[in-house]
Amino acid sequence: MDSQVIDILKTVIQQHGEGVLTDVRCCRALLQDLCRGAYVREVRLLLLALQEGVATELRNPPAGLPATLLGSRLVERLVTEHFLDRTAAEWAVLAWAIALGVSLPTVEKVPILPSSQPMGPGFTTDIPTNLGIELLNVSAGAFFFGEKIERKHLPDFAIMKYPVTVGQYRLFCNATERAMPSAPTWGWQENHPMVNVTWHDATAFAAWTGLVLPTEEEWEKAARGKDGCEYPWGNGWEPSKCCNSVVKSASTCAVGSYPAGASPYGMQDMAGNVWEWCDGWYDSRKSTRVLRGGSWCSNLAVYLRATYRINGNPSHRDYDYGFRCVRRSPGS
């Protein structure tokens, strides 16, 4: 490292200001553009660290935390939350510290990340083939967003057809030596959506597969199409087209159980089954993350609307919290 990668990161911060630290998507686009397809794993490490608050805590450390402990705390977060190899985690923290001009006595002598250095158990740049993840394309263009019916534009991207299943998440846990969370009352069923996952768990799975969590805009466009349907299937409430408790559901359902409820782009279970973690913050306070889509225990139709949003503590688990992932085009 490639000191060149750190130099590129410094350039991004110098030219665009520290505002990029609050916009992972913008930082990703800038790094990818300047790296021109090189340093893929280093960029992923930098972005994962950014998403986990490494850069913002380096700039604004928690009150009362000695500087000698700050670096170690951030490294431990990446190791324990994402099962990164310690050298890779130390490199990511150090890279941000150097780029921001912050002294970290405990990690400032970390060696350059060797080309053969593993990032962590099972951490790869490609989606493991045994996961059976199916991605569907969402074409670039304008669409209607939110309750205020804003007209927005997105580049093309691909999103998972179904939420991440118990079976897929179990493979991730096995590969990364991570413990499965506690099972819901109905037990683990491999073809049901994964539940009891925190936002950090969802982010870790996404990073392991080389994907990301969707922004609210990406999630909503995939759910309601460019014309802004009220529900994935259209503008009228039809309880038979999703897994919900307005009529009957007492637990999650197997993914794809309601094909008639597919969105205009073909995604399923975007209303009901599980609330889905998104990448964005719920509001300007930046203390909670957004969940979308309603769940199996939603007992009012309004919760299943494609524009409805709730907030969740990113460290909180619940029996109706799940997620799906996105792949973006290079540079988007």
Image: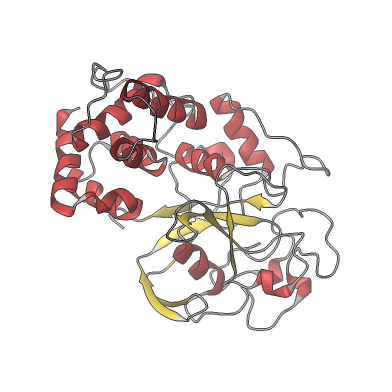
Task: Tell me where residue 295 appears, x and y as whole percent.
Answer: 70, 60
Residue 200, given in percent of the width and then of the height, sits at 52, 41
Farthest residue to the front: give it: 64
The chosen color scheme is secondary structure
Query: Residue at image x 43%, y 39%?
Result: 126
With respect to residue 257, does 56 lie above or below? Answer: above
Residue at x-position 47% and y-position 36%: 208
Left or right: where 248 falls relative to 180: right
The residue positioned 48% from the left and 32% from the top of the image is: 82
Viewer-closest of 134 and 252: 252
The reply to whether residue 127 is visible in this rendering is: no
Mark yes or no: residue 151 visible. yes
In the image shown, does 134 or 81 lie closer to the viewer? 81
Above or below residue 304? Residue 315 is above
* Image quadrant where one finds the N terminus: top left
Q: Is residue 258 above or below residue 301?
A: above
> Residue 107: image x %, image y %?
29, 19
Q: Is residue 42 left or right of residue 167?
A: left
